[in-house]
Amino acid sequence: MAFSQLIGQERAKRMLSRLIASHRVGGTYLFFGPEGVGKRTTALLFAQALNCAGPDAAEGEPCGACPSCRKILHGNHPDIRYLFPLSRAGKGALDDLLHDARWGEHGPRFDRAASISIEGVRDLRHEIAHRPFVGRMRAVIVCRAERMTTEAANAFLKMLEEPPPATIYVLTTARPQALLATVRSRCQPIPFARLASESIEHALIDRFGIDQVVASASAGMANGSLGRALDLATGSLEEERQQALDLMQTAGTGLEEVPELVQKLARQSDRGEIQRMLELLLTIWRDVMVLKVRARAHLVNEDLGNELTAEGRDLSLDEIVQTIRAIDETLRAVEGNVNVGLALAYLVSRLSRGMGGAEVWARSPGPSAIM
Ligand SMILES: [Zn+2]
């Protein structure tokens, strides 16, 4: 794999290739942008380019075939070190994360309560005090850097002040604003953008062997994230979809349970999980609409066909469209920085209004209160 094979991210590619070609690589980089758009893969490519023995390495293009490139490809290069958010799980969990962080894998999934601890940073500091084992340049990849505890972030800063030999740091995050400002200011920012849905569709078909119809529907719903599209296409979002259905059902029937459910969701899930849940809710309502107008389109939630037909039976098309709009507004609010609990409460009031729960709607704060 070479930089040229990376999907999208022209700007990041250009910035990194230029750095390598001008021999100005060093210090700490902040790869920021939505989840599932290639930040970790790009970090691995960057590390390859810095260590490659191939002919184009000096221009910033790794060969992908020399021993160093192959080690990085297979996830066993001794000078590539990850720093992950960890919960108190044992070594087995870490092995799983390392496996999933490899090239071409989906990417590690972290527990919602996991954080990057000061112990993790201290271990790292100890390990990298000496020169790289075999490579020209060691790369430390910090996944979900915003999950560093304050103590960890301060220890990390201290480490940056006494840089070990031949080492670069790549911090990846979808929420750069959640990083300690003092850490952020030490980094060179490299922006990552959402991917075009056609590129995602092609990648799903060509690289992951996913059926064209499923690939197209998943890419359309993935909001520019290949990782999300892969989750949608392979159905590994069952838990979040169930949450979305619970939210719908509660909004439609047991109004007194709404505050409790909203609180529970806001407490148990991080912002990213709420986002995914809302995106799934969008796919569900998109299907309700497709069924309502009897469009000849593929259903994302094909297995729920009967339930969703029933859901739309008593609603006008306009009410369904309003609901989709409300979910979309809430999603965008959650992507920003609003209070997740308030945003969900607003949404549920809108959902229940669509389903005849006018009473809750009358008591709700309305969009201007949260957005
Ligand atoms: Zn190489």
Image: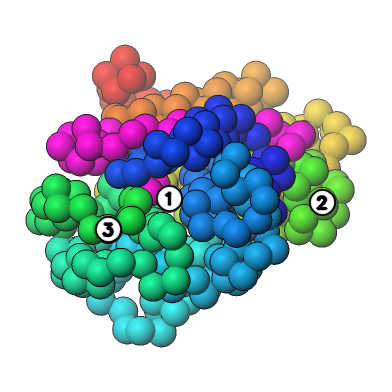
In depth, the one of 4 and 21 nearer the eye is 21
Whether 191 is among the magenta residues is yes
Residue 125 - label: none
Q: Quadrant of the N terminus?
A: bottom right
Which element is circle 2 on?
helix
Q: Is mark 2 within 8 Å of ligand 1?
A: no
Q: Which residue is mark 3?
A: 165
Residue at 27% over, 19% down: 369
Q: Look at the numbered discs 2 and 1 and tell me whether their residues touch, using CB distance below 8 Å.
A: no
Question: Helix, strand or loop at disc 3?
Answer: loop
Q: CA distance from mark 3 to mark 1?
A: 38 Å
Residue 307 locus on image (x, y percent): 69, 51
Image coordinates for residue 311, horizontal then vertical, percent? 65, 42
Residue nearest the observer in this picture, 135 or 246: 135
Q: 10 above or below 44?
A: above
Near mark 2 (Cα within 10 A), the count class, few <14, some 14-19 or many ≥20, is some
Question: Which residue does the image show at 27% across and 58% down from the upper left?
Answer: 165
Marks 3/2 in contact by CB < 8 Å: the verdict is no
Which residues fall within the magenta stretch? 170-199
Q: Amino acid at mark 1?
A: Glu
Residue that mark 2 sits on:
205
Q: Residues within 10 Å of mark 1 (few under 14, many from 20)?
A: some
The reply to whether the residue tagged 1 has its Cβ within 8 angstroms of ligand 1 is no
